[in-house]
Image (tube, rainbow, N blue to C red):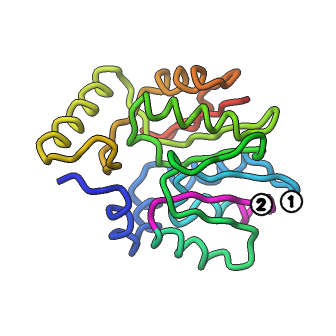
Amino acid sequence: MLEPMDSFFSSRIKGYDEHMLRDIEGAAEFYPFTTSLLPADQSCRILDLGCGTGLELEYYYGSGGAASLTCIDLSREMLDALISKFPNKDIKTFCASYFDVPLGEDIYDAVVSVESLHHFSEETKQSLYRKVHGALRDKGIFVITDYFVSSEEEELNMAEEALRLRAEQGIPDGVLIHADTPFTIQHEISVLLEGGFSRAGALKSWGSTSVILAEK
C-alpha cells in the first residue's frame, strides 16, 4: 500500500538514521562528500530540501561548516529530531512541502537535497527547479544526492507502477505519496538545464546513489 509522504517518514523516525547509514550503499561516503561541496563560511546561506533528521548536517557541522541553514521537510517528527541534534546552530525550519514554500529570489549560496527527489515527476521537478534557480544567488550551486536508475526502461516501468498503484488505491492527483520513481542521471540533468541552470553534471556514484552538481 502506498502511504502519504509525511506519515511514511514520521512513522519510521525510530531507527531512521541507522537504517539510512546501514542499508543504503555508500551512505557513509556520500553524505560527507555531499557536504564537502557546500560553502562553509558563516556569511553564506544554505537551503536543505527534504532534510529529514539532518544526517547530512551532522557531516557538515562536523567538518566545520558554519553557514546559516534553512531546512524544509514534510515530517514534523523528522524536524524535531533535527532540531534536537543541533540546538545551538543557526537553523530555520519549515514543516511543509518544498513545492509549496516560497523560496524567494537571490537568497541562497547553495541548495542541497539528499535522497528526497526521486519520488516526483518531471513536471513537478521542473517547477521546483525553476524556483531553486531563482532562489540561488549568482554562481550559486544546487547539489542533488539521490537514487537514480541506469536505463530509461527501468525509469518508465517504475513510474508506470506508481501510477497503477495510485489509481488502484484511489489516491487523488496532488497528494504526495511515498513511491520510488527515480530518473536516469541523464534525465535529471536535462530537467535541471530546462529549469535554468547553466550546467549540470554527475560527480560521483555509489551503487544507485549519485551526486549531481548544478550551477546557476
Q: Name the residue under label 1.
A: 42
Give yes or no for contact between labels 1 and 2 (Cβ–Cβ under 8 Å).
Answer: yes
Crowding at dot 1, Cα within 10 Å, few <14 / some 14-19 / many 20+, comes out as few
Q: Which residue is farthest left?
A: 168
Q: In this view, does 192 lie above or below 132?
A: above
Q: What residue type is labelled 1?
A: Gln
What is the x, y in percent for residue 161? 20, 35
Q: Does the magenta stretch include residue 74?
A: yes
Q: What residue type is labelled 2?
A: Ser
Residue in the image at 49% along x and 21% along y: 186
Residue in the image at 68% along x and 65% along y: 92
Crowding at dot 2, Cα within 10 Å, few <14 / some 14-19 / many 20+, comes out as some
Number of on-image labels: 2
Front-most of residues 213 and 1? 1
Front-most of residues 130 and 113? 130
Front-most of residues 131 and 140? 131
Quarter containing the C terminus: top right
Separation of disc 1 and disc 2 at Cα?
7 Å
Q: Is residue 29 above or below residue 199?
A: below
Quadrant assignment, res 69: bottom right
